[in-house]
Amino acid sequence: MLMKPRNFLNALLSRWGYKVVKFKLGRPNAISWLDDVRTLLPADSPVTILDIGANRGQSAESYHALFPQARILSSEPDPEAFRALADVVARLPKAQAFQLAFGESRGTASFNRFQSSQTNSFLAFDSRYRTETSSAVVKVTVETLDSFCGQLKIQQIDLLKIDTQGYDLKVLRGGGGLLGRKAIKLVLTELLFSPQYLEQPCFAEFDTFLRSYGYRLLGFYGQSQKGGQLNSCDACWVA
């Protein structure tokens, strides 16, 4: 059977690290950050992945499929979402679930639960753009990246993924020790471009902060548009 033209071209281009993707304006970018991570991290090595804001474990399953030997540490502060996460992680070897949030300092803090658990955040919605209020506020335990890794004697994180709905930069600020010695190889965060939460950081703040530790921007992924402008995407920095 003859190979389809697109498959043939992808097979040819893959020798130089390229691939053909279908892209439509206004829809999420077809290029996945997993493609770049797959190139930078060996799939058969025992990498360590820290998944902060793991929600119900969707990402953990993807990480395990891509890196079967990986040690996956997933954290989620929301009690309901954490129960679903724990069920997923229990089926994955070398994976652990922690009912924790991360921030600039250790302690406890008030966490907003919204109608969709994927939008839960320490931050409140900006009422000028979204009128929904939290359905409940719960107290959660907060760790820092530095203290968490110190307690578990983690020397290096190969992939740090943060998806905390506008709180990602504060999470990073709790990892100055790790970032300072380049103990985190890849940093993947969510960027919000349209106003959603009060006090959400902008891209420039992320880039300035990470560049101060010698990290460089690798790329943008999964771009979505809203009202004719960029709404959100993921971004990855590399040591």
Image: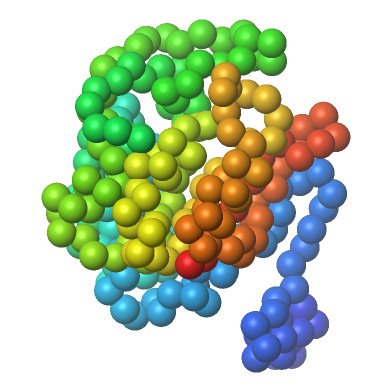
The quarter of the picture where residue 53 lies is: top left
Can residue 51 be seen in the rendering of this structure?
no
On the picture, is 203 further left or further right than 176? right
- Identify the residue at horizontal 57%, vertical 19% (top origin): 198
Residue 105, position as x, y percentages in the image: 30, 33
The structure residue drawn at horizontal position 76% and vertical position 40%, both measured from the top left corner, is 230
- The foreground one among 40 and 198 is 198
Position of residue 151 relative to residue 122, above or below, is: below
Q: What residue lies at 29% left-to-right and 41% top-to-bottom?
A: 144
In this picture the colour scheme is rainbow
Q: Is residue 23 left or right of residue 31?
A: right
Question: Which residue is more in the foreground, 35 or 88?
Answer: 35
The residue nearer to you, when weighing 219 against 23, is 219
Does 5 sit left or right of 209 as displayed? right
Quadrant of the image occupied by residue 217: bottom right
Q: Position of residue 24 (x, y in %)?
A: 82, 53
**Measuring 18% from the left and 53% from the top, which residue is drawn there?**
150
The answer to whether residue 215 is above or below residue 39 is above
Q: Is residue 70 visible?
A: yes
Towards the viewer: 223 or 212 = 212
- Figure quadrant of residue 63: bottom left
Q: x%, y% of residue 51? A: 36, 49
